[in-house]
Amino acid sequence: MKKNFLPIAINIAGEKILIIGGGQSAWKKIHILKRFGADVEVVALEVCDEIRNSGILYRQKSYEKQDLKGYLMFYSCTNNPDLDRQIAQDGREAGVLVNIHDQPELCQFVSPAIYQQGNIRVAVSSNAEDVFESIRLRNEIKDYLENKNKKQ
Ligand SMILES: C[C@@]1(CC(=O)O)C2=NC(=C\c3[nH]c(c(CCC(=O)O)c3CC(=O)O)Cc3[nH]c(c(CC(=O)O)c3CCC(=O)O)/C=C3\N/C(=C\2)[C@@H](CCC(=O)O)[C@]3(C)CC(=O)O)/[C@H]1CCC(=O)O
Ligand SMILES: NC(=O)c1ccc[n+]([C@@H]2O[C@H](COP(=O)([O-])OP(=O)(O)OC[C@H]3O[C@@H](n4cnc5c(N)ncnc54)[C@H](O)[C@@H]3O)[C@@H](O)[C@H]2O)c1
């Protein structure tokens, strides 16, 4: 069935979120999730220096299905498409929300391009069809809001 993503806002402050994989893609996700107060943990064969030095809890090991237990959701950022397909299936079976890096057809949720001004958050999504258009439009909205504030 064709994907049809509902944009919702989800509270992640203090919620346990797992990242599988420890490269730069994982680090970008972690950075955003920490900004919103999530309790982020990592499972990866290898982690990059940024993750190693961040104070985040990481377990250096090969992924296993039981690693998903107890998390609200997870992001898989491995460099192995076959493993990602398995992880997507495991997540559905375990009832933990699935995101597979840059593979929207395997995802239960995707991330919009965001702009935040205090409690106002603007999120632009393209139903995972055109992320560059999402980013472009978010930047236009950001410019609009910042100019409007300057005039006030
Ligand atoms: C908005 C943002 C949020 C975030 O990631 O948190 C986000 N991507 C960001 C950045 C970014 N993404 C890409 C580059 C190019 C450079 C690079 O390749 O590294 C950069 C720029 C960069 O990295 O700086 C390439 C890319 N991304 C996806 C694919 C695959 C595909 O489209 O199929 C391809 C290959 C496309 C191609 O080459 O054609 C897929 C997704 N990207 C999404 C979100 C989701 C859909 C959102 C929607 O509905 O529009 C989804 C499905 C991921 C998901 O959520 O699962 C974040 C904005 C950062 C900011 O705020 O500025
Ligand atoms: N770096 C980027 O900006 C970027 C952009 C677009 C797409 N991608 C794609 O996103 C994916 C991740 O990118 P990256 O640059 O972070 O990759 P990376 O190779 O730096 O990191 C992959 C991570 O997955 C881990 N991993 C692999 N197999 C594992 C297993 N069995 N168990 C546990 N951990 C395992 C590795 O240890 C490593 O930490 C790749 O598929 C890449 O092609 C990356």
Image (cartoon, rainbow, N blue to C red):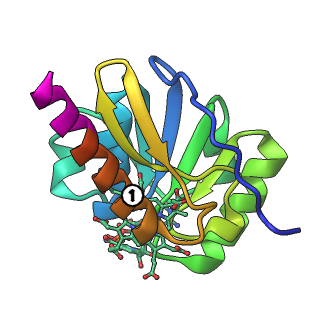
Q: Which residues are magenta?
A: 145-152
The C terminus, quarter of image? top left
Determine if the magenta segment contains residue 26.
no
Q: Is residue 90 above or below residue 73?
A: below
**In the shown orientation, is residue 57 left or right of residue 65?**
left
Residue farthest along the right direction in this orientation: 1
Q: Is residue 113 above or below residue 135?
A: above
Q: Give the labeled residue for mark 1.
A: 137
Q: In the rendered image, which quarter is residue 22 located in?
A: bottom left
Mark 1 secondary-structure assignment: helix
**In the shown orientation, is residue 79 left or right of residue 48?**
right
Q: In the rendered image, which quarter is residue 122 located in?
A: top left
Dot 1 amino acid type? Leu
Q: Which residue shows up at 67% across the image and 35% down it?
A: 69
Q: Is residue 6 above or below residue 76?
A: above
What main secondary structure does the magenta stretch of the protein show?
helix
